[in-house]
Each structure stands twice: as structure tokens, then as C-alpha cells.
Image (cartoon, rainbow, N blue to C red):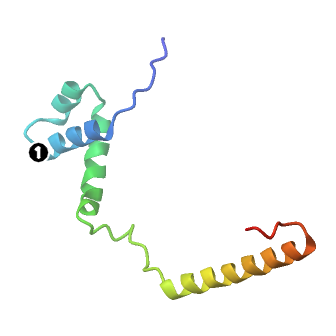
Amino acid sequence: MAKIARRTHSAVFKAKVALSALAGDKTLAELAQRFEVHPNQVTEWKRQLSERAADVFGGGGAGVQPPVDLKVLHAKIGQLTLENDFLEGALTKVGLLSAKR
């Protein structure tokens, strides 16, 4: 039996198939035949669309990251700036770095 190469589908195509499945005006078999994909694939894309639909409107919940503490970041930037300045001065004194920076 000949080996069939895997097809990769674009996100737009997957969304189109999943939205058609959610519409419910055609059976799963009809959609699979129309879009030339396996019925299980249509079901999987429909499930993924249903689960991730809230992310479109910003209500994902699972992907929400905690707020960034700017004070901690500014303190780290200050610390690194001091370290860089110190090292630059030390390297200049030793002669490993030119003073024309």
C-alpha cells in the first residue's frame, strides 16, 4: 500500500470547517466529504473551537498571566546598570577596555 503524505491545514481552513460543524445544518459525514477530511478531524476541530472561543474575547482564564511588578523590574535594571558601570570602570583601569566609550 502506498504511503500517503500528511496534509497540513491552515488555521483559516480549520476554523471554516469547525464553524460549519457548529452550524449544524449538515451531518458530520457530509462535512467530512465536502472538505475532504476525516470525520474525526472535523469533530476535533469543532471541540477545539468550542473550548477556545472565549479566548477570542479575552476571557480565556487559563492563559492569563499575573500582572508584572514594575518596581521589581526597575530595581533589577538599576542593579544591573550599577554592575555594568562598575565592571566598565574596572576594565578601563586594567587597560582591557578603552576609555573612549
When asked about the image quadrant of residue 17, the answer is top left
Location of residue 27 (image quadrant): top left
Residue 70 place in picture, x, y as percent:
49, 84
In this picture, is 12 found above or below 6?
A: below
Q: Secondary structure at mark 1?
A: helix
Residue marked by disc 1: 23
Image side of residue 8 versus residue 55, left or right: right
Q: Nearer the viewer, residue 54 or 77?
A: 77
Residue 70 visible to the viewer = yes
List the single residue furthest toward the right.
94
**Quarter of the image holding residue 51?**
bottom left
For the point 79% across and 74% down, which residue is it?
A: 88
Residue 9 at x, y = what percent? 34, 33
Give the residue at x 38% y 68%: 62
Q: Position of residue 71 (x, y in %)?
A: 52, 88
Is residue 22 found left or right of 48 in the rendered image?
A: left
Q: Residue furthest front?
A: 100
Residue at point 31% right, 41% down? 11
Q: Furthest-top residue in view?
A: 1
Q: Residue at 39% across / 31% down in the picture?
A: 8
Residue 42 is at least partly visible in this image: no
Q: How many dots with numbers?
A: 1
Amino acid on which the number 1 mark rests in the picture: Ala
Q: Nearer the viewer, residue 91 or 8?
A: 91
Residue placed most toward the observer, 46 or 70:
70
Looking at the rendering, in which quadrant would you find the C terminus?
bottom right
Tell me if 78 is positioned left or right of 21 in this view: right
Q: Nearer the viewer, residue 22 or 64?
A: 64
| Neighbour tally class for label 1: few under 14, some 14-19, many 20 plus, Cα within 10 Å | few
